Amino acid sequence: GNVDIWMMNPDGTELEQLTDTPEDERSGKISPDGTKIVYYKNVSGKQEIWTMNVNGENQTLLYNEDGYHVMQPVWSPDGNFIAYTRGLPGSGVCGPCSTWEIFMMNSDGSNPVQITNDNHRDQKPSFSPDGTELCFAHAESSNDCCNPTDLYKSDFSGNLTAVITDGNYQWPSDWGTGGILFTNGSNYNQQYLERLQEISLPVDEQIEHIEQGDEFLIERLRNPAADYSPVQ
């Protein structure tokens, strides 16, 4: 089946399906003022950025670009800007993801600006709480798709600063006032787990996609509430 965006109360009640189309919609983010959701959508094999009201109405194309995927959109804290990942489409496990870079545009889809330009597979941006920097995953090697990713941050001029470079796979989730929330995995399975969770596969199907022998990840999927020690 295809992937849709849903909403629920913080206690898990009153699930409501917001999108119901033949295409996949992913990575919904609520605007700071609570009125809109930005997300990306697969249209004829290409990713586009869309918005809708929080009740699912007024689903509208915000931004697409000929020849490129645009995906993983996030709001700035003031709601005036949207950061996103842009890259060339491709096939296979990795595709030409060395072309993935971080961009930013106005929240109405105008004036896209490239933030990174380093051929290091930059993706999954997140704004700092004051809205002056972006955190993202940055591949350790250029022209590379499947080896470890570091945690980097950048100002809007593209001045990069390494945050964590320990040879593992770092995947930022959010940047709040208390710090940067991220996942840390010791092998490519952790990156794959992130992707599987993002596309909302059932747990049993996620486990089937993980290589045999990675019992840590499999047990974490089966019991996500358990208090696991960090991956070393």
Image (cartoon, helix red, strand yellow):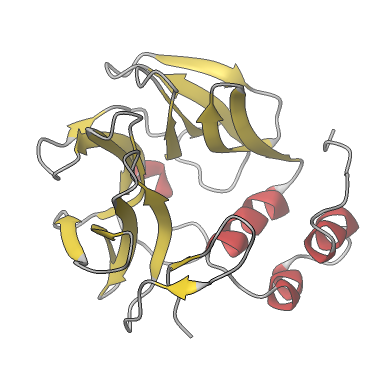
| Towards the viewer: 128 or 85 | 128
Residue in the picture at 28% in, 27% down: 115
Residue in the picture at 13% in, 57% down: 66
Position above or below: 134 against 12 = above
**Image location (x, y in percent) of residue 50:** 24, 59
Residue 96 seen in this snapshot: no
Q: Is residue 206 left or right of residue 149?
A: right
Residue 200 seen in this snapshot: yes
Quadrant of the drawing holding the C terminus: top right
Q: Is residue 207 left or right of residue 27?
A: right
**Image location (x, y in percent) of residue 14:** 54, 71
Residue in the picture at 25% in, 76% down: 44
Q: Is residue 38 left or right of residue 212?
A: left
**Image location (x, y in percent) of residue 219:** 87, 60
Residue in the picture at 36% in, 29% down: 77
Position above or below: 90 against 166 = below
Position above or below: 101 against 19 = above
| Towards the viewer: 13 or 228 | 13
**Image location (x, y in percent) of residue 230:** 83, 36
